[in-house]
Amino acid sequence: MRDKVVIVTGASSGIGKALVYELARQKAKIAIASRNIEELLRIEEDLKKQGTDILPVRTDVTKEIACKELIEQTYAHFGRIDVLINNAGISMRALLQDLDTMVLHKVMDVNFWGTVYCTKYALPYLLQTKGSVAGIISIAGFIGLPGRTGYAASKFAVRGFLNTVRIENRKKGLHVLVAAPGFTASNIRKTALDADGRQQGESPRNESEMMSAERCASLIVKGIRKRKREIIMTFVEGKLAVFLSKWMPALVDYLSYKHMAKEPDSPFK
């Protein structure tokens, strides 16, 4: 990744922040995007001390013009774009029957439309460099997770969108990666929206037992370097679950329901 120009959305925390530090370790040049400009500036200050060429850009990926400006500022600063990592994301936790549909719109705006906007405007530059576009989805992009209707729908949508972008550009040298972490220790569960659109606060899951954001970031960057088309992380909650969903879908439905119902304050039992 040395001297490759990489854009990371959702870069201020969790997997996004871990991706930035992993890319810096591998000597990439990085544009970091998030609504939290204060944290982006702290990351910039830290990594500039290590010699990283880094550009912080305050970006709300739900706004098409903001995504366009992110891409244009990155190109103006570095003169090329080699990799776009669509990482910005938000989750939710509530039963559909209790849910304000505004929550579904908000989750889709961040997870799906943010990916669409950034990919759309980065595509001409990525085709010039025969570069890579990556989307960070989830096991929820393969298997419906109860209590996460909006989240699962957005991740299924991102997977379908990026798989189609790959096929459209198969003769143009574009690499497209869809990366699906299992449960990963990050702040996404703390910022997940409840039925009324408020952040739920404390994570309902034991974060210490999950894959670290740093390990997840390392696997994603490796997948980009090797130009893989898909990565499914973790075995039981990832690869095995996706495999079984193709051959024993009713069993996976049962196990998914049972597993998610064990969460403290689960909206269903």
Image: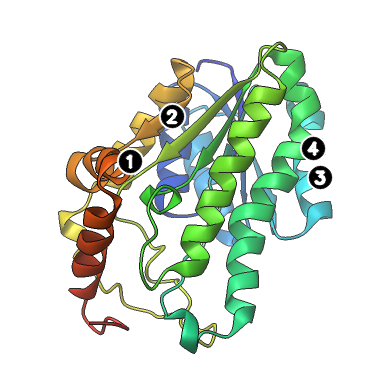
Which of the two discs, 1 and 4, sits closer to the camera? 1
Of residue 168 and residue 13, the one placed in the foreground of this image is 168
**Residue at coordinates 27% horizontally, 81% vertically from top-left?**
266
Residue 148 lies, in percent from the top left, at 42, 68
- Find residue 24 and name its label: none
Residue 35 visible in the current orientation: no
Point out the tag, 1 or 4, that comes first from the N-terminus: 4
Say above or below: 162 vs 99: above
Q: What residue type is labelled 2?
A: Glu
Q: Which amino acid does label 3 sit on?
A: Lys
**Residue for badge 4:** 121
Point out the tag, 4 or 2, that comes first from the N-terminus: 4
SS label for mark 3? helix
Residue 63 lies, in percent from the top left, at 77, 59
Say above or below: 153 vs 28: below
**Residue for badge 2:** 230
Instruction: Count the labels in the image.
Output: 4
Point out the tag, 2 or 3, that comes first from the N-terminus: 3
**Residue at coordinates 30% horizontally, 46% vertically from top-left?**
245
